[in-house]
Image: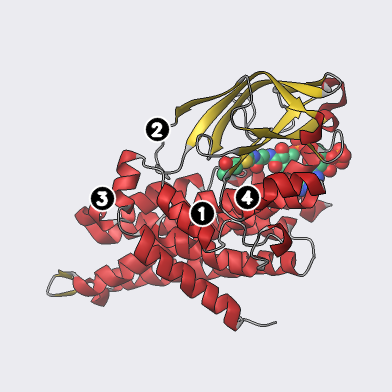
Amino acid sequence: MQFTLTEEQEMTRIAARDFAQKELLPGVIERDEKQIFPAEQIKKLGALGFLGMMTDPQYGGGGMDTISYVLVMEELSKIDASTSVVVSVNNSLVCFALEKYGTEEQKQKYLVPLARGEKIGAFCLSEPGSGSDATRQQTTAIDQGDYYLLNGTKNWITNGGTASTYLVFAQSDPSRGHKGINAFIVEKGMEGFSIGPKENKMGIRASDTHSLHFSDVKVPKANRLGEEGAGFHYAMKTLEGGRIGIAAQALGIASGAFELAATYVKQRQAFGKPLSDHQAIRFKLADMATGIEAARLLCLKAASLKDQGKSYKTAGSMAKLFASEVAMAVTVEAVQIHGGYGYVKEYHVERLMRDAKITQIYEGTSEIQKIIISREILK
Ligand code: CAA
């Protein structure tokens, strides 16, 4: 077992860290407050190859490993989780599914611009009435010969307004339950496809979250992804990798808040000495650092399993479950350590605390991860 990064992985991590400091830190508070999508920053991340990191270079990707993806997600998320969620969804949900299940024609048409970062993708599974219970898709896609007729609503879709390519899951044959669900590639601008208003969220406020409405959208047969009735299986398999990305996002949020707290305690004096000389603060820092290190190891283990072609389902869910809980606990402590300053925006930790919460909710709540882990253990 090796605990060292390769030179290439280390260089990728440094590139992401530099990018986050130079390009994400300036304006991060304003983007959060005014809900401004980081369009320029995403364009630059695309040029750096970070939007299709793991995609094969023949389809415009960077051909990097999942460990590098975890490192990039951690570094970006330390500063700006609104930007890193765009990176995560594009990489591990949309590019992954298109590369794994798409036809050569679909890859050339849709994957190449997404992997190059020229376009952004969205993954559309959740609905007003089914988030965790994802088999209960109410959106329908009825086979009409040359096309499917798509009707329904998707909720809380990351990149909902800014994406060009949408992976949409819909029920084509309710009598077959989850085996009737298909996956479709839907383009922005298709007749009958409309985008609801941007959600006014607690955290990751600069990311672009919308509901999507489909009213008699004619989706060509050529836009069905993979096999008839295999859509639910594709969604689940894709989310297994997505969860590694969100685990790394949670890790980054936690380590970002920790770095701020560890710096602050050396500067701030209380009762005649720096905060760092108080045992109550030292114990907090020790707990925070230990949780972060454990979360990092779980993320890297899941990534390493994926890179080795081994099963990473349980490891990815464990990483997401644990890292998101660490993110919540560490950011709450970081605010506490900052005292009154922690409660105002300029010190960044309150934003990180708000951002941490979503990592316990999206790509499967903590409770869903526990269902997945316990089922695997009891198999
Ligand atoms: N890979 C492949 N197939 C899988 C699978 C996996 N990981 N997990 C389940 N399946 C298959 C099962 O084998 C089963 O198929 P068969 O009947 O052919 O064997 C089928 O899917 C149904 O599985 P279950 O019986 O386990 O279904 P369930 O309803 O009991 O529970 C669940 C499944 C794990 C709870 C699932 O519904 C789930 O993961 N829910 C959470 C959904 C989620 O994470 N949503 C996130 C939305 S995307 C998002 O947040 C992105 C964003 O914008 C940031």
Specify whether tag 1 is near ligand 1 (CB below 8 Å).
no
Q: Which mark identifies residue 200?
A: 2
Q: Nearer the viewer, residue 96 or 139?
A: 96
The amino acid type, in three-letter code, at marker 3 is Lys
Q: Nearer the viewer, residue 89 or 136?
A: 89
- The image quadrant of residue 304 is bottom right
Estimate how packed mark 1 is, as few (under 14), some (14 to 19) or many (20 or more) residues with alpha carbons within 10 Å. Answer: many
- As measured in the structure, the alpha-carbon distance from the residue carrying label 4 to the one carrying label 2 is 29 Å
- Whole-percent x and y of residue 305? 73, 67
The amino acid type, in three-letter code, at marker 1 is Glu
94 up-or-down from 245: above or below? above
Tell me which label, 1 or 4, sits earlier in the chain: 4
Q: Nearer the viewer, mark 1 or mark 4?
A: 4
Q: Which mark identifies residue 355?
A: none
Where is mark 3, residue-wise? Answer: 345
Q: Nearer the viewer, mark 4 or mark 2?
A: 4
Q: Are marks 1 and 2 in contact (CB under 8 Å)?
A: no
Q: Is residue 379 left or right of residue 40?
A: right
- Whole-percent x and y of residue 96? 70, 52
Estimate how packed mark 3 is, as few (under 14), some (14 to 19) or many (20 or more) residues with alpha carbons within 10 Å. Answer: some
Residue at the far top in the pictured view = 216
